[in-house]
Amino acid sequence: METLPVKLPRIASVVATAAIAPAVLLSSPAFAADAASAAAPSSPTAPDQDAQGGAKPATTPAKIPATTPAEDPAAQARARVQQILNDPASGPGVREAAAKALKGDANAVRHFLDVEWAKEQFTDDYVRISQIIHSGGKAVQAAGKETLRKENQDAFTAFLKEGQHVARLEDDRVEMMRMLNGAGRGITQAVNDLMSHGTREQIREFVATRQHQVRAEDDRVALLGMLKDAGPGLKEGIIKLLESNPTPAQLRAFVQNEQHLLRDDDNRVDIARMVANAGPELKKAALAALKGTAADRTEFLKTGQHVARAKDKAAGHTGGSGTTGGTGTGTGTNTGTSTNTGTGTGTGTGVVQPAVAKGTGGNANVTPAGGSGSTALASTGAGSETWIAGTGAATALAAGAGLVVANRRRRASAEG
């Protein structure tokens, strides 16, 4: 890195010299003699005339010391260093060097103003710009890196005073456009207003803080909308959250994450119940969904169950949930130690609670189909058995319920 020309201390030195020059001249004997013979001011209200313009009685001027503390160059330099130390805009390097100089003699103070100040200011600004780059968006990063490459104090100062704010406005506008994806009504309204006539300061304030308050209101509206079609687990979670006076961060976390976990728990219960009255294809698909991912279970409730039911219906199997029903009679043979024949009717009911996904932040609406109805089953023989009493159905129901309970206990333990 090239040695930085010390411009700022040189300017400060010139200013200090210009400021003390009149004091030095006025205190010299030659200048005092010339001043005594100077012509009187023309103003009628000048200090050496009365109100009517007559001359005042001559007075003996007070004796002026050669130098006063206010005119002492060393004192003025020390006062300037103290101002730099107290300036909130001074960086840590400048403050440390200034404090060290004030503990020294007049030469140490002069050395700080002439040399150390500019050097430490350059270092502090370099560090500050690096920090801005680290936390900034793409435009801020690009502008900051370009500034550092110049290695020039004037460029550093220009970036810190104005350049960073111009670049950040560009980043903030990009961020607001990103917010619109899946946004609620409040965020959408606020972003559109700011994009059309918002100031740089208003846009910065919205992106930095106010967006979270506006989104919290959108999240509350979304949670209330979920209650209508929520399963028992999700409904309980929503009510519990809203009654706890949640923070914007808690509302956002529930909408983005927790609601999906609770909804999946409800879906597990629904699918496990469905297995008990399912035909072969529906049962197979339901068990696969229970072993799969949350997305698999949502897809099963949305479309998979209907495809499986259609296959069962085409194969002549009846059962499952929905509005499938009928009665019939027939004869059959139960092979064993004896053969029995007979007629009979039976009914079966399966109930599936619908699960609906609604929310902000890009969540899609998913309404897994379900319902309730009655299904009449025909069997012959006093000893006949149907497939719905199979071990697999009971195991699936128990497993689904067990997983839901375990998941809820784990989350409750984590929250506690």
Image (tube, rainbow, N blue to C red):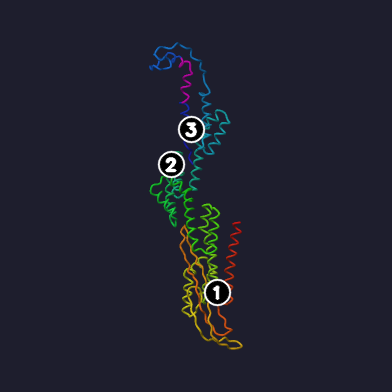
Query: For residue 232, which quarter of the picture?
Result: bottom right
- Residue drawn 40% across and 17% down? 45
Circle 2 or circle 1, nearest the eye: 1
Q: Which residue is mark 2?
A: 162
| Magenta stretch bounds | 19-32
What residue is disc 1 on? 276
In which quadrant will I find the C terminus? bottom right
Give coordinates of residue 25: x percent, y percent.
46, 20
Amino acid identity at mark 2: Glu
Instruction: Using the image as rendered, state which of residue 1 and residue 21 is in the foreground.
Output: 21
Residue designated by label 3: 9
Which amino acid type is marked by label 3? Answer: Pro
Residue that appears at 58% across and 30% down: 104
Residue 196 in the image: above or below residue 304: above
Name the residue rendered at 42%, 53% in the picture. 188
Q: CA distance from mark 2 to mark 1?
A: 69 Å
